[in-house]
Image (cartoon, grey):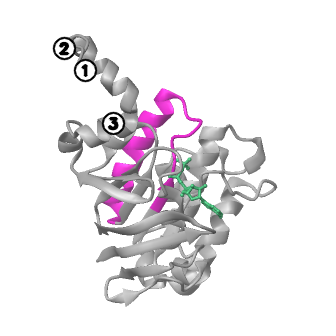
Amino acid sequence: MKLAVSGVSKHFQGVTAVNDVTLECASGEIVGLIGPNGAGKTTLLNMISSLLTVDAGTITLGDQAVHNIGPRQIARSGVARTFQNIRLCPNLTVRQNIEVAYTTARRHRRQRLGQLTIERLMHQLGIAHFAEHKASELAYGTQRRVEIARALALAPEFLLLDEPTAGMIESETKELIAAIMEIRDWMGCGVVVIDHDLSFITTVCERIYVLDMGRLVASGPPSVLRDDPRVAEIYLGRKARRQAIQAVNGPPSPA
Ligand SMILES: Nc1ncnc2c1ncn2[C@@H]1O[C@H](COP(=O)(O)OP(=O)(O)OP(=O)(O)O)[C@@H](O)[C@H]1O
Protein backbone atom coordinates (compact mmCIF):
# COMPACT_ATOMS: atom_id res chain seq x y z
CA MET A 1 0.00 0.00 0.00
CA LYS A 2 1.07 3.58 -0.58
CA LEU A 3 0.44 6.81 1.30
CA ALA A 4 0.62 9.55 -1.33
CA VAL A 5 0.58 13.31 -0.83
CA SER A 6 0.06 15.11 -4.11
CA GLY A 7 0.34 18.86 -4.72
CA VAL A 8 -0.78 19.72 -1.20
CA SER A 9 -0.88 23.32 0.05
CA LYS A 10 -1.96 25.07 3.25
CA HIS A 11 -2.28 28.79 3.95
CA PHE A 12 -2.75 30.55 7.29
CA GLN A 13 -3.85 34.17 7.00
CA GLY A 14 -1.40 35.17 4.32
CA VAL A 15 1.32 32.67 5.32
CA THR A 16 1.81 29.75 2.93
CA ALA A 17 2.86 27.08 5.39
CA VAL A 18 2.92 24.25 2.84
CA ASN A 19 3.26 24.98 -0.88
CA ASP A 20 2.44 22.35 -3.51
CA VAL A 21 4.19 19.43 -1.78
CA THR A 22 4.23 15.93 -3.26
CA LEU A 23 5.68 12.93 -1.48
CA GLU A 24 4.96 9.28 -0.81
CA CYS A 25 5.66 6.46 1.58
CA ALA A 26 5.12 2.77 0.84
CA SER A 27 4.34 0.02 3.34
CA GLY A 28 7.52 -1.05 5.09
CA GLU A 29 9.36 2.13 4.15
CA ILE A 30 10.81 4.66 6.62
CA VAL A 31 10.72 8.16 5.19
CA GLY A 32 12.13 11.31 6.81
CA LEU A 33 10.87 14.87 6.66
CA ILE A 34 13.46 17.50 7.58
CA GLY A 35 13.83 21.25 7.31
CA PRO A 36 14.43 24.32 9.50
CA ASN A 37 11.93 25.66 12.03
CA GLY A 38 8.77 26.87 10.32
CA ALA A 39 9.43 24.87 7.12
CA GLY A 40 5.94 23.36 7.24
CA LYS A 41 6.77 19.84 8.46
CA THR A 42 4.21 19.64 11.26
CA THR A 43 1.56 21.36 9.14
CA LEU A 44 2.09 18.65 6.52
CA LEU A 45 1.81 15.90 9.15
CA ASN A 46 -1.33 17.57 10.50
CA MET A 47 -2.89 17.43 7.04
CA ILE A 48 -1.92 13.78 6.55
CA SER A 49 -3.47 12.94 9.92
CA SER A 50 -6.51 15.06 9.02
CA LEU A 51 -6.16 17.43 11.96
CA LEU A 52 -6.00 20.17 9.33
CA THR A 53 -7.84 20.37 6.04
CA VAL A 54 -5.86 20.78 2.83
CA ASP A 55 -6.38 23.98 0.81
CA ALA A 56 -5.27 22.27 -2.40
CA GLY A 57 -4.06 18.83 -3.50
CA THR A 58 -4.93 15.30 -2.45
CA ILE A 59 -3.81 12.69 0.07
CA THR A 60 -4.51 9.04 -0.75
CA LEU A 61 -4.12 5.78 1.11
CA GLY A 62 -4.03 3.06 -1.52
CA ASP A 63 -6.82 4.09 -3.87
CA GLN A 64 -8.81 5.87 -1.17
CA ALA A 65 -8.78 9.70 -0.86
CA VAL A 66 -8.24 10.47 2.82
CA HIS A 67 -7.67 14.24 2.99
CA ASN A 68 -10.15 16.18 5.10
CA ILE A 69 -11.85 13.04 6.48
CA GLY A 70 -11.14 14.01 10.12
CA PRO A 71 -8.80 12.53 12.74
CA ARG A 72 -11.13 9.77 13.93
CA GLN A 73 -11.74 8.47 10.44
CA ILE A 74 -8.08 8.62 9.41
CA ALA A 75 -7.12 6.56 12.48
CA ARG A 76 -9.75 3.97 11.49
CA SER A 77 -8.38 4.02 7.92
CA GLY A 78 -4.91 3.10 9.20
CA VAL A 79 -2.88 6.25 9.86
CA ALA A 80 -1.66 6.79 13.45
CA ARG A 81 0.62 9.48 14.81
CA THR A 82 2.51 10.91 17.75
CA PHE A 83 2.82 14.59 18.65
CA GLN A 84 5.67 17.01 19.13
CA ASN A 85 4.20 17.92 22.52
CA ILE A 86 3.27 14.59 24.09
CA ARG A 87 -0.47 14.02 24.39
CA LEU A 88 -0.83 11.09 26.77
CA CYS A 89 -3.56 10.98 29.42
CA PRO A 90 -1.36 11.83 32.42
CA ASN A 91 -3.54 10.17 35.06
CA LEU A 92 -3.91 6.87 33.22
CA THR A 93 -1.31 4.15 33.51
CA VAL A 94 0.88 3.19 30.58
CA ARG A 95 -1.25 0.10 29.98
CA GLN A 96 -4.49 2.11 30.14
CA ASN A 97 -3.19 4.71 27.69
CA ILE A 98 -2.36 1.97 25.20
CA GLU A 99 -5.63 0.11 25.89
CA VAL A 100 -7.71 3.08 24.72
CA ALA A 101 -6.17 2.83 21.24
CA TYR A 102 -6.23 -0.97 21.25
CA THR A 103 -9.98 -0.96 21.93
CA THR A 104 -10.49 1.25 18.87
CA ALA A 105 -8.38 -1.15 16.78
CA ARG A 106 -10.43 -4.13 18.02
CA ARG A 107 -13.58 -2.39 16.85
CA HIS A 108 -12.40 -0.90 13.57
CA ARG A 109 -9.17 -2.59 12.48
CA ARG A 110 -9.67 -6.21 13.52
CA GLN A 111 -8.36 -7.57 10.21
CA ARG A 112 -4.97 -5.88 10.82
CA LEU A 113 -4.58 -6.76 14.51
CA GLY A 114 -3.03 -10.20 13.85
CA GLN A 115 -0.59 -11.08 16.62
CA LEU A 116 -0.59 -7.55 18.00
CA THR A 117 -1.13 -7.43 21.76
CA ILE A 118 -0.63 -4.70 24.33
CA GLU A 119 1.98 -6.85 26.09
CA ARG A 120 3.96 -7.33 22.91
CA LEU A 121 3.86 -3.61 22.11
CA MET A 122 5.06 -2.66 25.58
CA HIS A 123 7.83 -5.24 25.35
CA GLN A 124 8.87 -4.03 21.88
CA LEU A 125 9.10 -0.40 23.06
CA GLY A 126 10.91 -1.37 26.29
CA ILE A 127 8.19 -0.01 28.57
CA ALA A 128 6.72 -3.26 29.98
CA HIS A 129 8.17 -2.59 33.45
CA PHE A 130 6.30 0.75 33.54
CA ALA A 131 2.94 -0.84 32.63
CA GLU A 132 1.21 0.09 35.90
CA HIS A 133 2.88 3.51 36.30
CA LYS A 134 0.90 6.65 35.59
CA ALA A 135 2.08 8.38 32.42
CA SER A 136 2.77 11.58 34.37
CA GLU A 137 5.32 9.75 36.57
CA LEU A 138 7.56 8.82 33.64
CA ALA A 139 10.64 10.50 32.24
CA TYR A 140 10.15 12.42 29.01
CA GLY A 141 11.90 9.86 26.79
CA THR A 142 9.80 7.05 28.25
CA GLN A 143 6.59 9.01 27.66
CA ARG A 144 7.60 9.32 24.02
CA ARG A 145 7.94 5.56 23.74
CA VAL A 146 4.52 5.13 25.36
CA GLU A 147 3.07 7.49 22.77
CA ILE A 148 4.57 5.42 19.98
CA ALA A 149 3.17 2.23 21.54
CA ARG A 150 -0.26 3.87 21.79
CA ALA A 151 -0.14 4.90 18.12
CA LEU A 152 0.89 1.36 17.13
CA ALA A 153 -1.96 -0.10 19.18
CA LEU A 154 -4.23 1.28 16.45
CA ALA A 155 -2.68 -1.37 14.17
CA PRO A 156 -1.85 1.27 11.57
CA GLU A 157 -0.69 0.84 8.00
CA PHE A 158 1.28 4.08 8.43
CA LEU A 159 2.85 5.62 11.50
CA LEU A 160 3.64 9.36 11.61
CA LEU A 161 6.21 10.45 14.21
CA ASP A 162 6.67 14.15 15.00
CA GLU A 163 10.11 14.69 16.56
CA PRO A 164 10.31 11.38 18.44
CA THR A 165 13.85 12.04 19.71
CA ALA A 166 13.06 15.44 21.26
CA GLY A 167 14.16 15.35 24.89
CA MET A 168 15.89 11.99 24.53
CA ILE A 169 19.46 11.31 25.57
CA GLU A 170 21.80 9.64 23.06
CA SER A 171 21.33 6.10 24.38
CA GLU A 172 17.54 6.49 24.20
CA THR A 173 17.79 7.71 20.60
CA LYS A 174 19.87 4.63 19.71
CA GLU A 175 17.28 2.36 21.31
CA LEU A 176 14.53 4.20 19.44
CA ILE A 177 16.29 3.62 16.10
CA ALA A 178 16.39 -0.13 16.80
CA ALA A 179 12.77 -0.13 17.99
CA ILE A 180 11.45 1.70 14.91
CA MET A 181 13.27 -0.68 12.56
CA GLU A 182 12.07 -3.75 14.46
CA ILE A 183 8.49 -2.48 14.45
CA ARG A 184 8.63 -1.81 10.72
CA ASP A 185 9.88 -5.36 10.13
CA TRP A 186 7.35 -6.85 12.53
CA MET A 187 4.22 -4.88 11.57
CA GLY A 188 5.18 -4.00 8.00
CA CYS A 189 3.90 -0.46 8.40
CA GLY A 190 5.28 2.58 6.60
CA VAL A 191 6.78 5.29 8.82
CA VAL A 192 6.98 9.03 8.16
CA VAL A 193 9.22 10.75 10.69
CA ILE A 194 10.04 14.41 11.35
CA ASP A 195 13.16 15.12 13.38
CA HIS A 196 15.86 17.72 13.82
CA ASP A 197 18.46 15.10 14.79
CA LEU A 198 20.10 14.52 11.42
CA SER A 199 22.19 11.60 12.60
CA PHE A 200 18.98 9.86 13.76
CA ILE A 201 17.15 10.67 10.52
CA THR A 202 19.97 9.55 8.23
CA THR A 203 20.36 6.29 10.18
CA VAL A 204 16.71 5.32 10.35
CA CYS A 205 15.36 6.59 6.99
CA GLU A 206 15.75 5.09 3.54
CA ARG A 207 14.53 8.27 1.88
CA ILE A 208 14.38 11.87 3.08
CA TYR A 209 12.33 14.85 1.94
CA VAL A 210 13.67 18.33 2.64
CA LEU A 211 11.22 21.18 3.17
CA ASP A 212 12.11 24.87 3.31
CA MET A 213 9.59 27.71 3.62
CA GLY A 214 6.74 25.34 2.75
CA ARG A 215 8.33 23.98 -0.42
CA LEU A 216 9.94 20.64 -1.13
CA VAL A 217 13.51 21.55 -2.06
CA ALA A 218 15.19 18.16 -2.25
CA SER A 219 14.54 14.46 -1.76
CA GLY A 220 16.53 11.25 -1.96
CA PRO A 221 18.44 8.68 0.06
CA PRO A 222 20.57 10.02 2.96
CA SER A 223 23.81 9.37 1.08
CA VAL A 224 22.75 11.70 -1.75
CA LEU A 225 21.33 14.45 0.46
CA ARG A 226 24.45 14.63 2.61
CA ASP A 227 26.30 16.16 -0.35
CA ASP A 228 23.42 18.33 -1.61
CA PRO A 229 24.42 22.04 -1.37
CA ARG A 230 20.76 23.06 -0.86
CA VAL A 231 20.58 20.93 2.26
CA ALA A 232 23.87 22.30 3.58
CA GLU A 233 22.63 25.83 2.96
CA ILE A 234 19.38 25.24 4.81
CA TYR A 235 21.07 23.59 7.75
CA LEU A 236 24.21 25.61 8.06
CA GLY A 237 22.67 28.86 6.89
CA ARG A 238 24.09 30.94 4.09
CA LYS A 239 26.55 32.80 6.29
CA ALA A 240 27.91 29.71 8.03
CA ARG A 241 28.27 27.98 4.69
CA ARG A 242 30.26 30.91 3.28
CA GLN A 243 32.50 30.76 6.33
CA ALA A 244 32.99 27.01 5.88
CA ILE A 245 33.93 27.49 2.23
CA GLN A 246 36.31 30.32 3.17
CA ALA A 247 37.93 28.15 5.80
CA VAL A 248 38.84 25.72 3.03
CA ASN A 249 39.49 28.12 0.12
CA GLY A 250 40.54 31.29 1.89
CA PRO A 251 38.66 34.63 1.74
CA PRO A 252 37.24 35.75 -1.61
CA SER A 253 39.56 38.05 -3.56
CA PRO A 254 38.42 41.73 -3.52
CA ALA A 255 36.32 42.71 -6.54
N1 LIG B 1 -2.36 27.38 13.15
C1 LIG B 1 -1.53 28.24 12.55
N2 LIG B 1 -1.88 29.52 12.34
C2 LIG B 1 -1.06 30.39 11.70
N3 LIG B 1 0.16 30.06 11.26
C3 LIG B 1 0.58 28.78 11.45
C4 LIG B 1 -0.24 27.82 12.10
N4 LIG B 1 0.44 26.64 12.13
C5 LIG B 1 1.63 26.88 11.53
N5 LIG B 1 1.70 28.16 11.12
C6 LIG B 1 2.84 28.76 10.40
O1 LIG B 1 3.12 27.92 9.30
C7 LIG B 1 4.53 27.81 9.10
C8 LIG B 1 4.96 26.35 9.18
O2 LIG B 1 4.87 25.91 10.53
P1 LIG B 1 5.15 24.40 10.97
O3 LIG B 1 4.87 24.31 12.44
O4 LIG B 1 4.42 23.47 10.08
O5 LIG B 1 6.71 24.28 10.69
P2 LIG B 1 7.72 23.12 11.16
O6 LIG B 1 8.59 22.83 10.00
O7 LIG B 1 6.96 21.98 11.74
O8 LIG B 1 8.57 23.86 12.27
P3 LIG B 1 9.26 23.27 13.63
O9 LIG B 1 10.47 22.48 13.17
O10 LIG B 1 9.63 24.49 14.39
O11 LIG B 1 8.25 22.42 14.32
C9 LIG B 1 5.17 28.72 10.14
O12 LIG B 1 5.40 29.97 9.55
C10 LIG B 1 4.12 28.79 11.23
O13 LIG B 1 4.24 30.00 11.94
Instruction: Give the image location of residue 250, x and y in percent.
Output: 22, 10
Give residue 26's position: percent from left, percent from top. Answer: 28, 69
Which residue appears farthest toward the front when viewing the image?
255
Most distant residue in the right direction:
91
Q: Residue at x 33, y 36 (%)?
A: 233
Residue tagged by mark 2? 249
Which of marks 3 and 2 precedes in the sequence?
3
Residue 168 placement (x, y as % from top left): 55, 34
Specify whether residue 115 is painted magenta.
no
Is residue 27 toward the left or the right of residue 101 in the image? left
Q: Is residue 37 left or right of residue 231?
A: right
Q: Amino acid at mark 2?
A: Asn
Q: Nearer the viewer, residue 251 or 175?
A: 251
How far apart are the alpha carbons under marks 2 and 3?
Answer: 17 Å
- Where disc 3 sits, the SS reads helix
| Mark 2 residue's CB less than 8 Å from ligand 1 | no
Tag 1, which secondary structure? helix
Which residue corresponds to the image point at 68% horizontal and 37% vertical from the top-left? 139
Q: Which residue is mark 1?
A: 245
Q: Main secondary structure of the magenta part?
A: helix
Any part of residue 156 in sight: no
In the picture, the quarter occupied by the C terminus is: top left
Q: Nearer the viewer, residue 14 or 231?
A: 14
Span colored in magenta: 160-188
Answer few, some or many: residues within 10 Å of disc 1's Cα (few below 14, many 20 plus, some between 14 and 19). Answer: few
> Ligand 1 is found in which quarter of the picture?
bottom right
